[in-house]
Image (tube, rainbow, N blue to C red):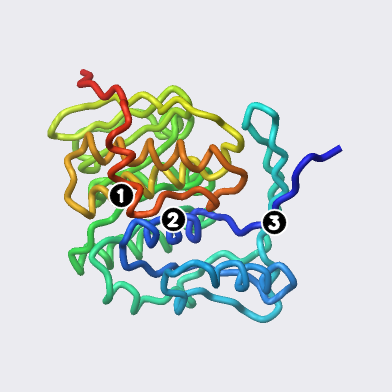
Amino acid sequence: EVDELLWSTGGGGTNTAAGFTRLGLQTACVARFGDDVFGKFVLDDLERENFEKKYLIQKKGDHTDYSTILVNPDGSRIILVYRGKTRIEEDIFPWQALEETKYLYIASLEGNVDLLIKVVNKAVEKEIKIVLNPGHRELRDKEKLRMIFPRLKALILNREEAEEVGSLSEELKPEIIVVTNGRQGAKLYSPLGNLFAEAFAGPVVDETGAGDAFSVGFVAGLIKGLPLDKCLKLGMANGASVVSKLGAKTALLYEQEVEDSFKRNLKIEQII
């Protein structure tokens, strides 16, 4: 017997776009989905979010990606993913979007590393700061992926992804590396010093979207010019908020809640 059922949109693109907008940033989202029944649901669900939607790509005949998420009593989950063949390709990527931004946050491109490299190179030409949170499909081509790391403002990985990437030589390191480890906190490595932040204690209902929520808080802090320890704290606070409710977008923080999050006690310390 299932106690609760929730239909909602997800994915790194729309999760983070919704989160950045709630934190007061002018945001547009590039994402692709189908014109099937799930695609229509995506459009309807995203109407309530205030990010710019002109770069959402909906093509006739495409099947929308779909996941069934089984949430355990402790908040951990099993995700069954159907890939609907809605990967963004070079010929449909809205290149004009790079004329309109100062920051570019890139989530998974479903393994399209060639497009990722072209987008990063074009963004660097335009002096756009880039934050990358790759998916496991991109990491399959990690040797090619590593070559763009020095062009990044920040690289965000979870512990398993960081182990897959392996150690990086100095010439391959981005400016900032963040490694998240769920309830064990997160570590940050940068020329200004290395930091460890513990996770906020609190209820865990559903871990879905925790990584996206952390990225939203951390990157929003970077964009707003906050010191790195506050960026970490905002990321941890946003992640803790999201896992307290069912769904990846439900409890994303709003701008007016940020100051309260900074008042919460959180251990952040220098590490070697």
Residue at position x 49%, y 28% in the image: 202
The label on residue 16 is 2
* Percent coordinates x, y for residue 68 in the rendering: 72, 48
Q: Closest to the observer: 150 or 79?
A: 79
Give the labeled residue for mark 1. 219
**From the image, which quarter does the C terminus lie in?**
top left
- Is 223 located above or below residue 243 in the figure? below
Q: Secondary structure at mark 1?
A: helix
User: How much space separates mark 3 and mark 2, taking CA atoms?
Assistant: 18 Å
Mark 3 residue type: Trp
* Percent coordinates x, y for residue 253 in the rendering: 41, 49
Give the labeled residue for mark 3. 7
Residue at position x 28%, y 75% in the image: 100
Q: Secondary structure at mark 3?
A: loop
| Label 1: how many Cα within 10 Å (few below 14, some 14–19, many 20+) | many
User: How much space separates mark 1 and mark 3, taking CA atoms?
Assistant: 27 Å
